[in-house]
Image: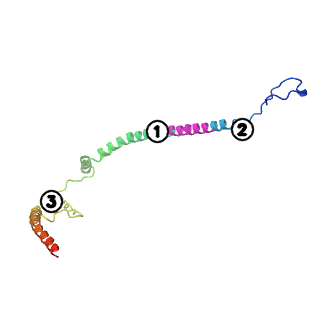
Amino acid sequence: MKDFPAYGKGTQGKLVRQKQKEDPYKLVPLVMALVIFLGVAMFFVVQRVEYIATERGIKALMFKKREIIEATLPLKLEAGYLTRLNRVESIAKRKLGMINPASFRIITPPEPKIEPLVDTTPKVSAAEIEKKSEKSQAAGQKSKTKKAPASKAKNKTKVNQ
C-alpha cells in the first residue's frame, strides 16, 4: 500500500492518498510523433504548392506561345504574298524597267552529278551467280558420292595396320 502513508500521529488519524509524481518524459513520444507528422504534412503541402505554381507557369507559357503564333500568322501570309514570283516579276518590269531576256541569253547550268560514296552497282551479274550456284550444287553431289568410298578405304587401311 504505497499510496497510503503509515497510520500514526502525523496524519491525525486520517488516511490521505499521496499524489503520484508525474514522469516528465511521459509526453516525449507523443511530441515526437506530432513533430514527425507535422514535418511530413508540411513536406506534402510545400510540394503541392510548388506543383500548382509550376502548372500555372506552364499554362502562362502555353498562352504566350499561342499569342505569338497568332501574331506571326499574318506576317507569314504577308511574306508569302510579297515574295510570289508573279508579283516580283511585275514590279521588276513596271518600276525598275526590266524586260524578259531573249531565249538565247538564258543559260542553265548542268545538273551536278552526285556520286555515291559507296559503290552500289553489283560486281557480279545474276547469271554468273546462278551459274556458280549450279556448279556448287553439282560439285556437292559429286563430292558426296566420292567421299563415301574414300572413307571406307581409310577405315580398311587403319584396320590393316
Q: Nearer the viewer, residue 27 or 107?
A: 27
Which labelled disc corresponds to residue 104? 3
Q: Quadrant of the C terminus?
A: bottom left
Q: Amino acid at mark 3?
A: Phe
Q: Earlier in the sequence, mark 1 or mark 3?
A: 1
Q: Secondary structure at mark 2?
A: loop
Read off the residue under disc 2.
25
Q: Nearer the viewer, residue 96 or 161?
A: 161
Q: Which residue of the protein is positioned furthest toward the top in this rendering?
A: 14
Which labelled disc corresponds to residue 60? 1
Q: Nearer the viewer, residue 117 or 3?
A: 3
Residue 40 is inside the magenta segment:
yes
Left or right of 111, for residue 16: right
- Is the Cβ of the residue at disc 2 closer than 8 Å to that at disc 1? no
- Is the Cβ of the residue at disc 2 closer than 8 Å to that at disc 3? no
Left or right of 55, for residue 141: left
Model colouring: rainbow
Q: Which residues are magenta?
A: 35-52
Distance CA(mark 2)–CA(mark 3): 109 Å
Q: Is residue 33 above or below residue 137?
A: above
Q: Which residue of the protein is positioned furthest toward the right in this rendering?
A: 9
Q: Amino acid at mark 1?
A: Ala
Badge 1: residue crowd in 10 Å (few <14, some 14–19, many ≥20): few
Badge 3: residue crowd in 10 Å (few <14, some 14–19, many ≥20): few
Q: Is residue 131 above or below residue 69?
A: below
